[in-house]
Image (tube, rainbow, N blue to C red):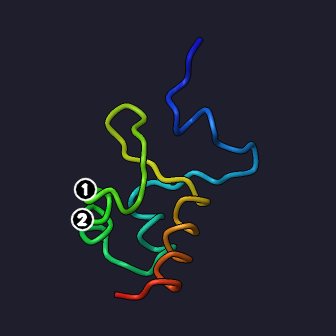
């Protein structure tokens, strides 16, 4: 059975956050998180109607932001 690409690469220890948890982790608003997701700056996946984020992806975004500030 083929899994979606984002789930296939998920490590066993990687935490999964919903929108509000991911926004709180990054200390940004849910609305801004949605903007970043729509611009493909943060990858997410869906479980049913819920948008979910991997902790490793949030950390990757935070590191990239520190490396190349706007």
* Marks 1 & 2, CB-CB < 8 Å contact: yes
Q: Residue at x 51, y 73 (%)?
A: 25
Q: Which residue is mark 1?
A: 38
Q: Which quadrant of the view contains residue 59?
A: bottom right
User: Residue 35, image x and y in percent?
Assistant: 24, 65
Name the outermost residue toward the front.
68
Percent position of residue 32, x then y: 27, 72
Distance in Å between CA atoms under marks 1 and 2: 5 Å
Quarter of the picture holding the C terminus: bottom left
- Relative to 69, residue 26 above or below: above
Mark identifier at residue 35: 2
Residue reaching furthest to the right: 13
Image point (49%, 69%), residue name = 61
Q: Is residue 6 above or below residue 55?
A: above
Q: Position of residue 49 (x, y in %)?
A: 31, 36
Q: Residue at x 43, y 35 (%)?
A: 47
Provide the secondary structure element on which disc 2 rests: helix
Q: Name the foreground residue: 38 vs 24.
A: 38
Q: Is residue 70 above or below residue 56?
A: below
Pointer 1 local density, CA inside 10 Å: few below 14, some 14–19, many at least 20: few
The kind of secondary structure element at disc 1 is: helix
Q: Quadrant of the rendered structure where residue 3 is?
A: top right
10 relative to 17 in the view: left or right: right
Q: Residues within 10 Å of mark 2 (few under 14, many from 20)?
A: few
For residue 54, which numbered disc appears in the image? none
**Residue 15 occupies which quadrant of the picture?**
bottom right
Number of numbered discs on residues: 2
């Amino acid at each position: 059975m083929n899994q979606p690409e984002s789930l296939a690469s998920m490590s066993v220890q990687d935490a999964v956050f919903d929108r509000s948890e991911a926004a709180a982790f990054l200390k940004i608003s849910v609305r801004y998180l949605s903007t970043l997701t729509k611009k493909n700056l943060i990858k997410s996946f869906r479980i049913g109607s819920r948008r979910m984020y991997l902790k490793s992806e949030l950390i990757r975004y935070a590191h990239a932001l520190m490396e190349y500030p706007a």
